Image: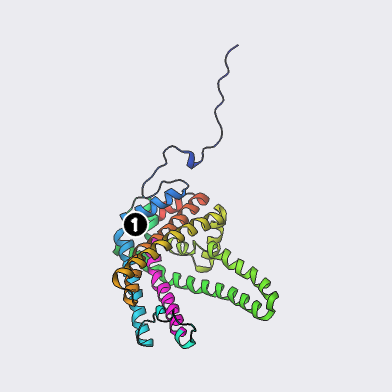
Amino acid sequence: MSEQPERPDTTPMTPLDAPEALQLGIVPLRPLALPDLVAGMAQGLRRNAAALIGVGFAVITATELLRWFVSTLVFGDVPDARAITDRPRLDWAEVRPLLADAALHAVIAALLGLLLVAVVNVVVPRAVFGHTTGARAALGAALPALPRLLLLALLTAVVFGAIAAVAVFAVFAGGSAGLLLALPAVAAMFYLVIAFTFAQSIVVVEGGNPVAALERSRRLVAAVGWWRVLGILLLAGVVFGLLGMIVSAVFGRISGGGALAEALAAVLSGTLISPATLVLQSLLYVDHRSRVEGIEGLWRKAG
């Protein structure tokens, strides 16, 4: 009796099973694991330092200078929280400048940071396919996306502001029961923070309008895994947060503290942490879009 030939294994091979995936740029062209994302982030920063770190330094420095200028103009100096930390009781007149300065800093950082967001999302899709982008070329390609990014930021602020208003109203109007009514609003806000992660990348890379970008981001995040995005961003936030705290502590100890030392530490840590965080988010967008729709659309865009 003749020996029957062995039947071939018909189980489809996933890209992660491939022994050697094609790699043209900073990441292999297959579904990305966490080590791929970390390595791609490092390679992207190294190969495009002028565009990513250079623009990051300019944005962070401009943020700190503008904050210093406005705070000095309004309050006479940048408010220092350490001046009231040892007080047994806090006076609203002392706390108010600190809160106003923090809000001012957040608004300035968010607005100027849109330029860095646009630059990163110009550079990263190109870097995936092996292209290196200089600062001038990245800025030229990023500037047209700024109005859409600004509209997206305003729309997102309205959405989260409305949800927060519902939660606050429930607490004040319902008393103890209002706390239970506010929980769904808090959960919705937490869900949407992650679901909208890719909206900025979509606005820059795909040129979509802000409303469509929010919905498309939600679908791309859900298609691969909301929890996956949460876990990666949470891990990155913890690591980068600890790094920023270490830099601030070391710089403060060396320089003796003060508002100037805090500003210099913020520039030093933010120059690396801000671009690195945005590069990681952009790579996550590339990964999720490629898993769901294939790599062809990004290939044409990068070309």
Q: Residue at x 65, y 77 (%)?
A: 171
Question: Does residue 92 sit above or below 297 in this rendering?
Answer: below
Q: Return the residue nearer the eye: 276 or 177.
A: 177
Are there few (<14), some (14-19), or many (20+) residues within 10 Å of tag 1? many
**Residue 194: percent from the left, percent from the top?**
53, 62
**Is residue 113 located in the magenta-colored stretch of the structure?**
yes
Secondary element under disc 1, as helix, strand or loop, is helix
Range of magenta residues: 95-121
User: Can residue 303 be seen here?
Assistant: no
Question: Does residue 90 sit above or below 116 in this rendering?
Answer: below
Q: Residue at x 31, y 55 (%)?
A: 46
Q: Return the residue nearer the eye: 147 or 175.
A: 175
Screen quadrant of the N terminus = top right
Going by the image, does 129 lie left or right of 169?
A: left
Q: Return the residue nearer the eye: 87 or 220.
A: 87
Q: Amino acid at mark 1?
A: Leu
- Residue 101 location, quadrant: bottom left
Which residue bears the numbered disc 1?
Answer: 45
Going by the image, does 241 lie left or right of 250?
A: right
**Is residue 22 located in the magenta-colored stretch of the structure?**
no
Magenta-highlighted stretch: main secondary structure?
Answer: helix
User: Can residue 185 be seen here?
Assistant: yes
**Residue 21: percent from the left, percent from the top?**
42, 41
- Residue 259 location, quadrant: bottom left
**Residue 263: percent from the left, percent from the top?**
34, 73
Question: Does residue 250 sit above or below 226 in this rendering?
Answer: below
Going by the image, does 212 lie left or right of 57?
A: right
Q: Return the residue nearer the eye: 227 or 179.
A: 179
**Residue 223: percent from the left, percent from the top?**
56, 54
Q: How many marks?
A: 1
